[in-house]
Image (spheres, rainbow, N blue to C red):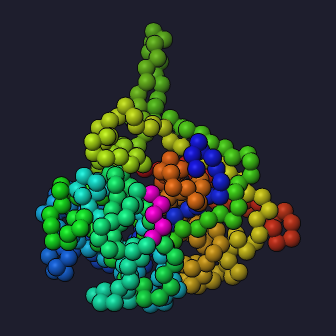
């Protein structure tokens, strides 16, 4: 869907940054290594922490002669139910330029001896074409990619993201590989579309107007909008020959904001049955409290947001935070509530 036509919103909640923020995981649980299983990856710029900071403008660069490499995630979860995920987003990459493809697999063993590839037949949402290599996804453009799959309910303590030269694990990439941010986790759809009174603003913040003694007006800008990504303008998917992040003429400036109200929402869609439930409820619930507000930690963490849960158009997506520190609800009938929220673009 395009033209900013709001349908049923979807929030993609990143498990990796959430677990790092609350202290359940540390960077020692997220590793990156060459596919021989023992050689460290050489960073030409940035470091491994930059892959998980939810800031795609702050990218890491992996040397082109690294060949294939693995990014391995230890969720620390012994229960299959709370270790599941259903999406992967790679933001700010240059995979078309580097001729790179990626795959996602999971296993209960850190050796991935009996791994399941969830990338062999995913839902290819954004910039995720079919690869000539089995189980792999090959982006046609630089920019960002998003795939989803059915929740994997078994054999899933460990996840591994494999990035390799398209069609050849043992070959060098065409150029250094650049990655801005990696998101892995579960998405949640709002139970319905918002009321018709959706508010949308573009805030050109960061500019201060100064009047001189003679009355002339001058503008000072700390920023005009998001900085460029590794190879493209933010959220743009394009080949190296068509557009890159130095094409500032076509960059979209300002900060997008949404205000949405949802009426007559069932209490089961808003809240846990036990609001003091243990980690099984907060990690694997189906309500907005546990799967959205809890996993964003209020305003603390950004999330990937789409105004339409079925959209395959990159213009319907962005990184946002809550614009208010509260979860706002009001009961309007038996077991029925109204709720509202504001979202503000983040980079």
User: Which residue shows up at 60% across the image and 55% down it?
Assistant: 308
Residue closer to the observer: 146 or 331: 146
User: Which residue shows up at 57% across the image and 84% down it?
Assistant: 280
Find the magenta span and give its range.
122-126
User: Which residue shows up at 44% across the image and 15% down it?
Assistant: 212
In the rendered image, the residue lying farthest to the top is: 214
- Residue 94 against residue 327 in the figure, above or below: above
Indicate the position of residue 253 as horizontal and vertical percent values. Answer: 45, 36
Observer able to see residue 18: no
Q: Is residue 134 left or right of residue 12?
A: left
Give the dominant element type of the magenta stretch: helix, strand or loop: strand
Q: Is residue 253 left or right of residue 53?
A: right
Q: How many marks?
A: 0
Quarter location, residue 41: bottom left
Indicate the position of residue 331 as horizontal and vertical percent values. Answer: 81, 64
User: Which residue shows up at 33% across the image and 70% down it?
Assistant: 136
Q: Is residue 194 left or right of residue 167?
A: right
Residue closer to the observer: 327 or 228: 228
In the rendered image, the residue lying farthest to the right is: 333
Indicate the position of residue 300 as horizontal and vertical percent values. Answer: 50, 60
Residue closer to the observer: 306 or 13: 306
Q: Is residue 204 magenta?
A: no
Indicate the position of residue 195 as horizontal and vertical percent values. Answer: 74, 52
Quarter location, residue 63: bottom left
Observer able to see residue 154: yes
- Residue 273 against residue 236 in the figure, above or below: below
């Amino acid at each position: 869907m395009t033209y900013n036509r709001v349908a049923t919103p979807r929030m993609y909640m990143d498990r990796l940054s959430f677990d790092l923020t609350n202290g359940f995981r540390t960077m020692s649980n997220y590793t990156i290594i060459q596919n021989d299983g023992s050689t460290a990856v050489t960073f030409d710029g940035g470091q491994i922490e930059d892959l998980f900071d939810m800031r795609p403008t702050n990218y890491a660069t992996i040397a082109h002669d690294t060949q294939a490499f693995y990014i391995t995630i230890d969720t620390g979860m012994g229960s299959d139910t709370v270790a599941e995920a259903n999406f992967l987003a790679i933001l700010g990459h240059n995979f078309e330029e580097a001729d790179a493809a990626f795959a996602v697999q999971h296993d209960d063993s850190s050796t991935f001896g009996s791994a399941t590839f969830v990338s062999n037949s995913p839902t290819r949402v954004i910039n995720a074409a079919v690869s000539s290599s089995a189980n792999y996804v090959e982006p046609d453009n630089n920019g960002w990619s998003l795939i989803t799959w059915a929740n994997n309910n078994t054999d899933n303590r460990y996840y591994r993201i494999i990035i390799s030269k398209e069609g050849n694990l043992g070959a060098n990439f065409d150029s250094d590989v650049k990655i801005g941010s990696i998101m892995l986790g579960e998405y949640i759809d709002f139970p319905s579309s918002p009321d018709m009174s959706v508010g949308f603003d573009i805030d050109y913040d960061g500019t201060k107007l100064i009047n001189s003694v003679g009355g002339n007006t001058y503008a000072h800008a700390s920023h005009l909008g998001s900085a460029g990504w590794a190879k493209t303008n933010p959220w743009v998917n394009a080949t190296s020959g068509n557009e890159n992040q130095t094409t500032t003429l076509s960059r979209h400036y300002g900060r997008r904001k949404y205000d949405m109200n949802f009426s007559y929402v069932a209490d089961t869609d808003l809240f846990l049955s036990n609001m003091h439930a243990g980690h099984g409820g907060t990690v694997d619930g189906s309500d907005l409290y546990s799967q959205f507000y809890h996993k964003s930690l209020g305003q603390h963490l950004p999330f990937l947001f789409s105004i339409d849960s079925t959209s395959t158009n990159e213009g319907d997506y962005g990184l946002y935070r809550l614009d208010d520190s509260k979860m706002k609800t009001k009961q309007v009938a038996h077991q029925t509530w109204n709720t509202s929220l504001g979202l503000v673009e983040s980079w």
